Image (cartoon, rainbow, N blue to C red):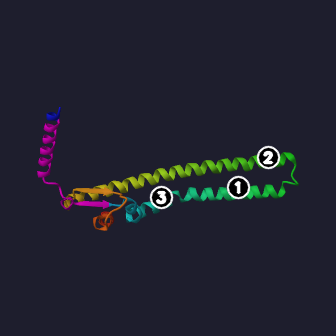
Amino acid sequence: MNKMIKRWLVASIAGLGLLSSVPAVSAQELKVGLVNSERILREAQLARTAEQRLEAEFAKRDKEMQDLATRLRTLAEKLEKESAVLSESERGRRQREVAELDRDLQRKQREFREDLNQRRNEEMAQIQERAQRIIRQIAEAEKFDLIVQEAIYFSPRIDITERVIRALNAAR
């Protein structure tokens, strides 16, 4: 058994010797870049234009909901003020009207948020797709080995976000 252990140790040590003779890849040889996609979606002119387009597209529905909310508040306040002098049946009718209007407003608000989020996601996906193409072009042109999106820590010297934003703005 001792001979077997000695042979294994000799083989292991020889293996380690072989590994140490293989040249290690130096971190200096690796060209790495970082892109902050949140910053691109916040600062690129394309993103700002998309946001303005969404605001214009949904402005009419937003105004309708604001008007509906105002009408609901007015009806609720009027019911509260006049409740003492109203007949039981009239008070019940107005309460049902307020409750129905409230449900309608909540439904419209939910639909509005869903539609807005869907359209925003569509717009942002297009911007991200264009940004990805630009990032690939920069990577190929400047011979990057790796480009990372998002990181916990990075050196500002590897951040290429500004170049991507400039290229997106120029490509409009």
Q: Main secondary structure of the magenta part?
A: helix
Q: Secondary structure at mark 2?
A: helix
Of the image marks 3 and 2, the number of the one nearer the N terminus:
3
What residue does disc 2 label? 93
Residue 46 or 38: which is nearer the viewer? 38
| Other residues around mark 2 within 10 Å, as few (<14) / some (14–19) / many (≥20) | few
- In the image, the segment drawn in magenta is 5-34
Secondary structure at numbered mark 1: helix
Residue 54: give its label.
3
Using the image as rendered, state which of residue 107 and residue 17 is in the foreground.
17
Q: Residue at x 35, y 58 (%)?
A: 151
Q: On the rendered structure, is 162 left or right of 66?
A: left
Where, quadrant-wise, is the N terminus in this rendering? top left
Q: Which of the 4 image quadrants contains residue 70?
A: bottom right
Tell me which numbered mark, 3 or 1, is placed earlier along the sequence: 3
- Left or right for 55, reference 65: left
Q: Amino acid at mark 2?
A: Arg
Q: Which mark is residue 72?
A: 1
